[in-house]
Amino acid sequence: MREFHKRSVVKAICWRALATLTTMAVVFLFTKQLTLAFEIGAVEVVVKILLYYGHERLWNRIGWGKLQHPLAALAVTRELEPEHMDEIEARLRELGYL
Amino acid sequence: MRFLRRRRKRNACAGGLDGVPHGLLKRLAETGVMPRTAQIVEGGGLRQMRASLPPISSVSWSCFMTGANPAEHGIFGFTDADPETYRLRFPTFTDLAAPTFWDRLGERGLRSAVINQPATYPAREIPGALVSGFVALQLAKSVWPRDHLPPLERMGYRIDVDSRKGRDDPDGLLADLESTLDTRRKAAAYFWDREHWDYFQLVVTGTDRLHHFLWNAVVDQHDPRHDRTMAYYRAVDELIGDIWDRFHQGRSADDEGQGFLLLSDHGFGAVRRDVRLNAWLQESGYLHYEKDEPESVADISPASRAFVLDPGRVYLNVKGRFGRGSVEPADAQALRDEIASGLGELTFEGDKVIARVFTREQAYRGPKFDQAPDLVAIGADGFDLKGTTKAKDVLAETYFQGMHTWDDAFVWSRLPVPDDPEISQLAEVIEQWLSP
């Protein structure tokens, strides 16, 4: 099943909020500099949210590994059965074509 | 990436009104029955359009969806006769020998959502989604991809009305028309939101059914069912308006109408008499049967020189072309001229019965030219041509009130539609717009 753009956008925002807060926490733990942690977080949140969205949409076009509806790939391309031809004839007669 | 591409790419939307003549649409728009349609067409662009030859839905819509001549796509009518046995067969979507423009758009990465398209049964894969229309039998075989089937079933989607009601229960037919149109509206809303389409198309076929059985009520304001038929047209107008509004959401005023089309596949008019052309051929000595009560052209005798398939397709029974052929190829031209001339002389109460007779050279071009009928007759106003073999009288009254007409289908678009348009020319117009 394909995803709508808005679902990808919401997922991107949720994940970015979680990941950026994690990045900021790690930077603060290593440097003890709150300003630096916010600056890195601010740059990262913009760049990576765009990358994430593009990455999602790209993967959305790849069918590999996706669970599809069990009937999704069944094309009906064969000739109709004779009884169906009889039914078509009846429909055409109802409308006066025959 | 798709989300970037969609922003800069154009899209298009077509609304098909099966069997709505140019004159009727214009009148309904001008008299306030179809106010939304009136708003759409008031700036110009509404044109009379020629349907296919013959002017029936399976051929005309096949011409529309392929942009090809019948001798290219191979659909010449609702029926074909097997050249060896003369048994009738009913061409389906699997017989369509040319790609649809949805297929061609798909090669450029564009997707189509097509709902209730006649002559696409059984549904096959297209780049996008397809719901087949008339003569679709089972919904399960009318939907591509199949994962749209459960939602359509849940909304109670109906492929068609019960046409049997047309004869005995006209009020029941009207109720069917209303409820079926309602499911078209639901299906349109569903696919509009669910499918990532570049081209969207919805065909309303109820208009054709209404005209077949209740044409008099549509055109005669004193008819007791006139108001209800107008109410149906108001509902069709609301649906057109709804799709127009959806299409224009988020667009600038400069873009209004760009990429939007309205069209019909043939016109309609009142019936005076059915014209059974096989009875005329028999009466004129061109057609003989092996049985007193022939079921179809499969019962013709080898002495036959010509036969007709619905509605006005004349085939010469030429040796080498048909299993029981009797006409020498060298004599075919003279025989064809003779039959065309005889058809032109048919009259009823002083009026000509046949408006025009086209030769296959005038009507067809393409690799399937040899399978084309030798002549295609078009009935004059009021004369509905039939290919039945079961009738003895050439002219007869009928319970049908409306008949197809050839030269007064319509198209409305602000795209560059050619002058004096013909339905097969619209595919290229749409493709040019979507992928210039």
Image: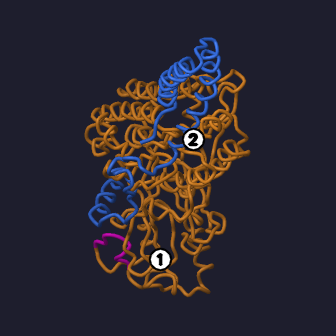
Q: Which mark is residue A80?
A: none
The blue-coloured chain is labelled A
Residue shown at the point (42%, 81%) measured from the top left: B84
Q: Quadrant of the N terminus of chain B?
A: top right
Q: Which residue is mark 1?
A: B286
Dot 2 falls on which chain? B
Q: Viewed as shown, does residue B388 lie left or right of B315?
A: left
* Closer mark to the observer between disc 1 and disc 2: 2
Whole-percent x, y for residue B228 in the image? 37, 26
Please name whichever residue, A25 or B41, is drawn nearer the observer in this view of the structure. Answer: A25
Give how far across and how far down residue A13 sits, in percent: 51, 23
Question: Magenta includes B225?
Answer: no
Mark 1 vs 2, N-terminal side:
2
Image quadrant for the C terminus of chain B? top right
Label 2: how many residues lie within 10 Å, few (<14), some (14-19) or many (20+)?
many
Mark 2 secondary-structure assignment: strand
Q: Nearer the viewer, residue B336 or B184?
A: B184
User: Can you name the residue that lies furthest to the top here?
Assistant: A35
Q: Identify the residue under disc 2.
A: B199
Measured as percent of width and height from the top left, residue B408 is found at 59, 44
Looking at the rendered structure, the kind of residue marked 1 is Tyr
Say which chain is orange. Answer: B
Above or below: residue B15 compared with residue B230: below
Dot 1 surroundings within 10 Å: few (below 14), some, or many (20 or more)? some
Report the residue at 45% width, 66% height from top: B309
| Magenta extent | B293-300
Report the label total.
2
Residue pictured at 46% horizontal, 72% vertical:
B307
Percent position of residue B67, x then y: 62, 54
Chain that bears disc 1: B
